[in-house]
Image (tube, rainbow, N blue to C red):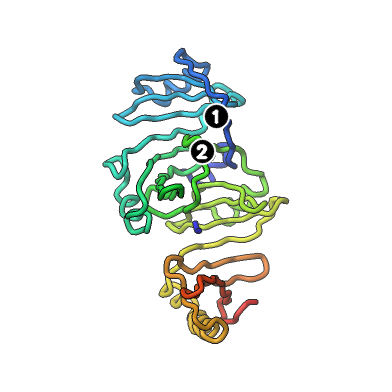
Amino acid sequence: MKKTITILSALALSMSLFVSCDDNNDSGNDSASVFSTEFNAKYPKATNVEWSTKDSYELASFDLDGLENTAWFSKTAAPNAAWKMTETDIAPISSSLPLSVKTAFEKTEYAKAPWTIDDIDMITRVGMMTVYVIDVENGALEMEIMYAEDGTHIKTQADDDNDNDNSSHLPTTLPAPVMDYIVANHPDAKIADIDNEGGMLEVDIVENGVEKELLFNPANMWHSTTTEGLGHGQVAAAAPKVMPTFMVVMKSQYPGFMPDMNEGIDYVETPTVNYYLFEIENKATGVEATIKIDSDGKQIQ
């Protein structure tokens, strides 16, 4: 499934890969923390503050503006710059959820039965844009859909956060070559999410309202950039030869197949070739396939 702060500003802040946390290390502690000064400066109107420890983090649970929050402070960072993330629990489809996010979500299959909303969180992190994560469930199936504040879809993925505490979104430092590439090639972008995908470092950015997925190999060299979810009309306008070639290839090489209308068309850029990636499916057999067409209308095997 497919899937704020500017990049230049983010150079002065720590960035992120995701870190897992062990629930066995939780411990309650209502007393003041070594990070209380930083916390009080950041959230002077917080009430009902309670501190606890989880692995290498101290967590401050508190109420603010009628919402429940949890702020994460790194015990390995300097006390005056230890804040890394705050998760704010938002009641399902409440007034605290931006209308743009609510509208975007309601257009998805997850907004109706058999799916139900389990949780909605606003996540703010050092060096990254604010995102909204909507957790949905269908029996044993759990998914999370991430949006930017303007409703831009970031990604949809299986929810594997067993602790349900968003610890999988905690930030850490991006490798310098990766950061240098993003600054040089996407100076106006905002980083939305960072993950590891099949041995690759995945960095999701939003650039001029468009979500892009950047992949970097284990040597931190750029591997590819994918712009996801393009419509057929967008592709036809950008590269007029692509759609006619796609239709010919699908009918001649994949009889009985049709485009997967739940997925848009991806535009993939690599160091050697750029192409449009179509996902097709045989509804009778359930078999899926992909077709790659470059901007000149030539099929890529």
At 43% across and 35% down in the image, what residue appears?
Answer: 87
Left or right of residue 123, residue 183 in this image: right
The three-letter amino acid code for the residue at tag 2 is Asn
Nearer to the camera, 291 or 4: 291
User: Residue 162 got which mark?
Assistant: 2
8 relative to 246, above or below = above
**Mark 2, secondary structure of its residue:** loop
Spatial CA distance of label 1 from label 2 is 9 Å
The three-letter amino acid code for the residue at tag 1 is Asp
Horizontal and vertical percent position of residue 219: 73, 51
User: Residue 23 got which mark?
Assistant: 1
Label count reads: 2
Nearer to the camera, 80 or 66: 66
In the rendered image, the residue lying farthest to the right is: 219
**Mark 1, secondary structure of its residue:** helix
Horizontal and vertical percent position of residue 243: 48, 80
At 42% across and 26% down in the image, what residue appears?
Answer: 42
Q: Residue 68 lies in what quarter of the image? A: top left
- Where, quadrant-wise, is the C terminus in this rendering? bottom right
Nearer to the camera, 77 or 245: 245
Q: Residue 225 lies in what quarter of the image? A: bottom right
Q: Residue 74 lies in what quarter of the image? A: top right
59 relative to 256, above or below = above
Horizontal and vertical percent position of residue 5: 47, 43
User: Residue 113 got which mark?
Assistant: none
* Dots 1, 2 in contact, CB < 8 A: yes
Left or right of residue 249, residue 263 in this image: left
183 relative to 56, above or below = below
Circle 1 crowding by C-alpha within 10 Å: few under 14, some 14–19, many from 20: few
Horizontal and vertical percent position of residue 22: 58, 31
Circle 2 crowding by C-alpha within 10 Å: few under 14, some 14–19, many from 20: few
